[in-house]
Image: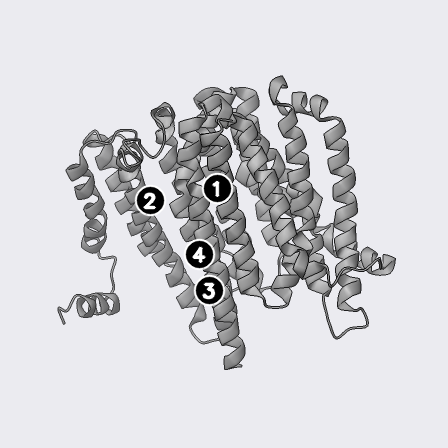
Amino acid sequence: MLEELKKLSKETAVYGVSTVVGRLLNFLLLPLYTHYLVPAEYGVVATLFSYLAFLNVLYGHGMDFAFMRFFDPGSEQSEETSFSTAFWSLAATSLVISGLIHVFASTLSVYAGVPENLSDITRYAAWILAFDAVALVPFAYLRMTHRAAVYAGIKVVNIVMNLALNIVFVSNMHMGVRGVFLASLVTACATFAMLTPVFVPLLTSVFDRSLHKTLLRFALPLVPAGLASMMVQVIDRPILKFMTDDATVGLYQANYRLGIFMMMVVNMFDASWRPFFLQRADKPGAGAVFGRVLTYWLAGGSFLLILITLFVAPAVTFPIFAGRALIAKAYWPGLSIVPVVTLGYLFNGIYINMLVAPTLAKRSELVAYATALGAIVNIGTNLLWIPRWGMMGAAMATLAAYAAMALALYLMGRGLYPVAYEPGRLARVTLCAAAVAAATKIFGVHVASGNQLILRLGLLAAFPVLLALSGFLDQEELGALKRRLGLA
């Protein structure tokens, strides 16, 4: 058993590190785009990539998860038959759909809001989707055969290549929006080529119709949940585009991505949280431990939220790249949305905390209901708030969606598993964070301004001080803190 757990921890570490490295490398595209694309051009990029996110769900239609679910080298189905059936299914559907998009690209571009002179990027997008889809099963095979290093290596090379090609096409060759999508297309093709040693030995002409039906029966019900989840994440861009303009979407996208640091913390927490509570569910006192995790998550997440809110402007406006700021000055008017987006990710972490009860009670449909509610709230509030507050309305809609998901999962999970949440301590964290937020208003600290650094440091330090004065720490925690500081 210990050897199996060691293998699991090693693979988790490889996947986790590669994910963090990948996200940080992707983040480097932000200064590149903001300095070489005007907000309207970046808005076109953001909107079309939002459509790609939805279409990725449809292109894959859960086939990679179905392949993983029914992959069994010891069964009557050979590895080659299972792999080939799933692979040829995705290859055929991707070829047909991308072929149709390619033929009707000019018409589809009009409906997607892509400028007429850029309709060729719709064709690039079609084949990006196709190559990404046919790579799904080979990547799934790597995961199922525990080749985590190969999987992570190809993913990181993919991101590095995309970043390098963006620099060449966008910065050096000044290809603008076309360069962004051409870089993605070349990268998708190269990734497929890197995977050929993995899937060519497995690929046969066999297509098992019976197995294909089994795979589809498992896969297709996953699509609605996948689409709902994607709506929560990206539906705001297309709605913002149709209710405002490309420039507003560009400002929104650039500043939305500054929430990456909270998002990365949430992703890392998600990766470790699920195995943590699954392995401890039957141990004495597990409910109290799970409740304490939410308390610590809210405290740590609130500190990170305050840190980002106070220092995002100084960080992105300081000249660090040969006298250039992290993002171009034309995008600074959107900095005010960053705290709202970051708070949304904080609620997403609370939602992940709330997965305990439905997961342990084997009520996975409750997660689907919460995600669907989040999608409905996101669409409704976007339509309601964007006309009133523009891109701030879109940011608030995302916050409302994640908050609704967390609340819904909490209400539906009550009674399914006894988690001892700590309402008093949660209230103290909330009140202390609110007090710091109020102080930023009283002292005139502006999110979109990079001045008053000393005052910002003082406000950041005020949060843990207020927590301590509120009686947040219990005796065990105070003792541990004193030992850590060498005071006991």
Relative to 192, is 308 on the left or the right?
left
Front tag of 4 and 1: 1
Nearer the camera: disc 2 or disc 3: 3
Looking at marks 2 and 4 on the same chain, the residue that comes earlier in the sequence is marked by 4
Instruction: Look at the numbered discs 3 and 1 and tell me whether their residues touch, using CB distance below 8 Å.
Output: no
In whole angstroms, how far apart are the C-alphas of marks 3 and 1? 24 Å
Q: Secondary structure at mark 3?
A: helix
Kind of residue indicated by mark 4? Met
Residue 148 position, x and y percent, is 55, 64
| Amino acid type at mark 1 | Leu
User: Label for residue 305?
Assistant: 2
Marks 1 and 2, how far apart at CA: 28 Å
| Mark 1 or mark 2: whose residue is earlier in sequence | 1
Residue at image mark 4: 268
Label 2 close to label 3 by CB (< 8 Å) = no
- Image x and y of residue 437, in percent: 27, 38
Three-letter code for the amino acid on which mark 2 is drawn: Leu
The residue depicted at 52 percent of the width and 29 percent of the height is 382
Instruction: Nearest to the eye among marks 2 and 4: give it.
Output: 4
Classify the position of the C terminus by image quarter: bottom left
Question: In whole angstroms, how far apart are the C-alphas of marks 4 and 3?
Answer: 10 Å
Residues under numbered marks 1 and 2 in contact, where contact means CB atoms less than 8 Å apart = no
Q: Earlier in the sequence, mark 3 or mark 1?
A: 3
According to the picture, the residue beneath numbered tag 3 turns out to be: 13
Q: Residue at x 35, y 30 (%)?
A: 336
Residue 176 position in % (x across, y down): 51, 26
**What residue is drawn where x is 45% and y is 29%?**
252
- Camera-near label (1 vs 2) is 1
| Amino acid, disc 3 | Ala
C-alpha span from label 4 to label 1: 23 Å
Question: Who comes first in sequence, dot 4 or dot 1?
Answer: 1
Q: Is residue 343 left or right of residue 150?
A: left
